[in-house]
Image (cartoon, rainbow, N blue to C red):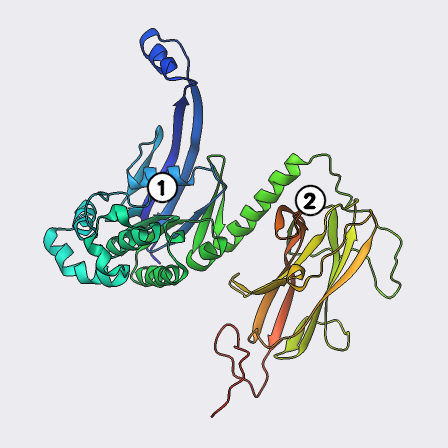
Amino acid sequence: MSSDKIIEVTNVSKTYTLYDKPTDRIAELFFRTKKGKKVASLKNVSFHVNKGETVGIVGRNGAGKSTILQIIAGTLSPTTGSVKIKGRVVALLELGAGFNMEFSGEENVFLYGSILGLSKEEIKQRYQQILDFAEIGEFIRYPVKTYSSGMFVRLAFAVAINVSPEVLIIDEALSVGDVQFQHKCMAKLRELQSNGCTILFVSHDIDSVKSLCDSAILLNKGEVHSQGTADEIANNYIELIHQEQLDKRKQIQDNVGSLYEVTNKSLDWTAESFIGSERHGLGEAKIVKLLLEDANGRALDNIVYAEKLNVKFLVEYFMDISTEINVGLLFKDDKGIDILGDDSWNHKVLLPSAKQGSRFVLNFDFPNFYLKPGTYSITVALGAMSEDKATWNEYYYDWIDRAKILTIRTKEDVRVWSKVLLPAKITLD
């Protein structure tokens, strides 16, 4: 990958002036009385994107993600700072931006294509490719005001990617289409990546960011919180959300060092340190220990493919818990991609509300017919359930990334060439 800087953002800030009522703006203009309130959307944001790199931008609503993309795309001016960008830029920032609602889809293809820098002849040459990708059929002849949001984004994306952009900027546009279209778009983005296109990608879908992006940037309250690999920033993003919950609930004491009388003499409840892990959560309940065991109950850190595996959670309540708790388990590959996961809610098994000092042992017991040979990290979590028990709440009591590393060894009579093996029964009729 080239080290040439294609996008260079230097100390960019964006400040808006808000007024309580329209007359305040006039009063400030003519009488020079300060009526407006300054609100900073971005504060000294700096980063760069190298040629051929795909960078994700994540953050909570109001973090400044869309603002920085609009400034980079040139549709918004910064208050201070500068942006340098090289090459033909295509920005999908707002659904249907550049379209005329009264025009037909065909007319908008030529309109939008010309806005993106194509000549009429170039658009004609690519017109069939655009139609094939959009898959909106006879609706291409209808006014776009009659389109569904999914049809809108299909056509806009189809034009944009057929411009052969050197820089592609995407702001949540792909979340509008149906699942099949999203898969198609992801495949096209990977094709653009292989052709050296530089991509700046904003999404709330952390899995998409981790899968697609080389690196990522986390924005928080208009500032760069952190930059790093997509997996690191995904973890930081989750931790940031949980930290916000901690700030809202300062009265909660995290009694990490407290140990209570062992109620199960057959288990060692000495707290595990989880060295090398990343951990966050409210701390009212904690995973004291995580055990990996084989079918005979022996502790292990590696198994042969298709052997039985038991993941045992030792959970302790450090405060009175008034909600039921869902227990989650997730396996990630060596690239940090989520591979397999499950939670106890799916099996109608929730940890009950209980008093401080209560302890529970929960087992995830399964034969490993899925993970191919290799190494996997295990992420575990305790999540507070909503009152209707249908969803997790916004906060977690405990979340541990890379709590354990599991090695799957090869089995001689099994060949696994995909990330997971399909547990199919194959017959010949």
Left or right for 211, reference 187: right
Distance between the Cα atoms at labels 2 and 1?
Answer: 33 Å
Along the viewing direction, whichever of 92 and 350 lies nearer the viewer: 350
**Residue visible at 79% across and 58% down in the picture:** 360
The amino acid at mark 2 is Leu
- Circle 1 packing at 10 Å, graded few (<14), some (14-19), many (20+), is many
Q: Where residue 238 sits: x, y (%)?
A: 57, 48
| Residue 378 quadrant | bottom right
State the residue lying farthest toward the top: 31
**Residue visible at 23% across and 44% down in the picture:** 99
The amino acid at mark 1 is Leu
Q: Where residue 142 sits: x, y (%)?
A: 21, 52
Along the viewing direction, whichever of 209 and 174 lies nearer the viewer: 174
Left or right for 335, reference 389: left
| Residue 245 quadrant | top right
Picture disc at residue 69:
1
**Residue visible at 39% across and 50% down in the picture:** 201
Q: Element under label 1?
A: helix
- Contact? badges 2 and 1 (CB < 8 Å): no
Q: Element under label 2?
A: loop
Left or right for 311, reference 15: right
Q: Give the vertical position of 237 relative to 122 (above or below).
A: above
**Residue visible at 30% across and 41% down in the picture:** 73
Picture disc at residue 282:
2
Q: Earlier in the sequence, mark 2 or mark 1?
A: 1
